[in-house]
Amino acid sequence: MVIAKTIDGEIGIMPKHAPVLGVLVEGGVLTVKRGGGESDLVAAVHGGFLSVADNEVSILAEMAELGSEVDVAAAKDALQRAQASIEADQENADAALAAKRARARLRAAGEEVG
Amino acid sequence: MGAQLRLLRRRIKSVKSTAKITRAQELIASSRIVKAQQRMQAAVPYEREITRAVTGVVSNTTSVDHPLTVAKERPAKAAVLIVTSDSGFCGGFNANILREAEALGTLLRDRGVEPVPFVTGRKGVAWHSFRGRPMGGQWTGFSRRPAYSDAKEIADALIEAFIDDNGVDEIHIVSTGFVSMLTQEVMIRRILPLEVEESTEKPDAPLPYFEFEPSADAVLDSLLPRYIESRIFSALLQSAASEEASRRRAMKSATDNANELIRVFTMQMNQARQAEITQEISEIVGGANALADAAAGKE
């Protein structure tokens, strides 16, 4: 099963799902639940699409990172910096986006973020 | 040593150092082609999927009414994205592209459409500014190693010009397609208004009917710009690989030429040296004979 976050909200795709094209949100976390005792595949996905056709799910992301490959320290650092600039300037859209991305990366890596 | 001999020696030396440079360039280009090809291949799955998605959307929704897909009735201006290289030493690579771009420009003018060049690559920019032609946009510095962000920048500028009421009504790309190591050809494609390129293998079953999350319009809104970016990115990557391939070929023939020149000059030099020796011997023999004759006359 594939769980992704589209603009409308979370969507879970089971096998034999009807064809869907969805727009993914910035800073979403994608989870692929693999059966047979294998661990889940988790990735931070920033923007892009999800397309389901012919019993195949493709994720077209503008940027993506596997949870196991996330540099946790760097992501925490990025989150802190982004939060600092949000505090300084409430309408800083770039920083808000950066914070969102950093949170998604940390969640994908299995870290708890507030 | 004779003057001719010295001249030939000097020429051989200079041709040899040229050959060294062109040989090095050839080797560098060969190693870069492989990397450029890998980058090209790495982008293929994304492009394939996004093309499939766009085809799916466009063939599903009966009336696609999106600013990026509607052709204007009387197009007045057309953007032509010309993809050239940043550096030279690559044979006819840039000349071919610019020639094709000129031909396309003439074709467009015949239709009453004014072409506006958007140029990437230092060579193309220099060509246009030398002739005093105004450019709609110019980008340099990444022809050998284009990044996705470069393609995004170009796509943003082009889409902005397309959506603007006084902007362009069509967008064409002139770039070099990488067919194989030995063949690269200039390709001209219209990317806007949208002409979705069908994938080569026709699906047997009709395309599945898609559901959209959240709606067809919203999906198109974000899908189409991505599609155009990916088309531009693939054009840049192919152009990079083609550039290296044609550089390798140009440098190989330059090295071969230099080696041939060295061979000819060496032969000429040997002949000149032999002629000099022969002349010296006959002078010595002549002198000795003259001395001997003089001595014999005294006695």
Image (cartoon, rainbow, N blue to C red):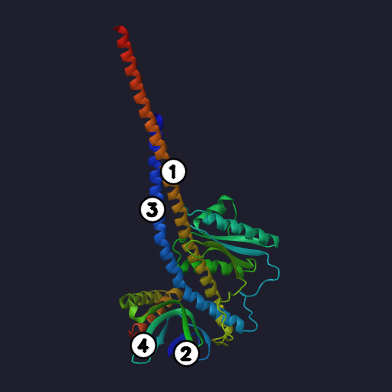
Q: What residue is at 43 percent from the left and 88 percent from the top?
A: A2
Mark 4 belongs to chain: A
The label number, if any, that marks residue B26 in the structure image? none
- Check contact, mark 3 vs mark 1: CB within 8 A: no
- CB within 8 Å, label 3 to label 4: no
Spatial CA span between label 3 and label 4: 49 Å
Please state, as top left, top right, bottom left or bottom right, where the C terminus of chain B lies in the image.
top left
Q: Secondary structure at mark 1?
A: helix
Residue at 46 percent of width and 92 percent of height? A15
* Residue B264 to residue A40: above or below: above
Q: Position of residue B102 (x, y in %)?
A: 61, 57
Nearest-to-viewer mark from 3 and 1: 1
In space, the residues marked 2 and 4 are separated at their CA atoms by 16 Å
Crowding around mark 4 (Cα neighbors within 10 Å: few <14, some 14 to 19, many 20+) is few
Residue B18's spot in the image, x, y percent?
Answer: 41, 46
Both marks 3 and 2 on one chain? no
Mark 1, chain letter?
B
The label number, if any, that marks residue B261 in the structure image = 1
Near mark 2 (Cα within 10 A), the count class, few <14, some 14-19 or many ≥20, is some
CA–CA distance in space, label 3 to label 1: 18 Å
Per the model, the C-alpha gap separating discs 3 and 2 is 55 Å
Q: Amino acid at mark 2?
A: Ile
| Sooner in the amino-acid sequence: mark 3 or mark 1 | 3
Label 3 sits on a secondary structure element that is helix
Q: Secondary structure at mark 2?
A: strand
Q: Which residue is mark 4?
A: A40
**Do marks 3 and 1 share a chain?**
yes
Question: Dot 2 corresponds to which residue?
Answer: A11
Q: Are marks 2 and 4 in contact (CB under 8 Å)?
A: no
Q: B253 or B225: nearer the eye?
A: B253
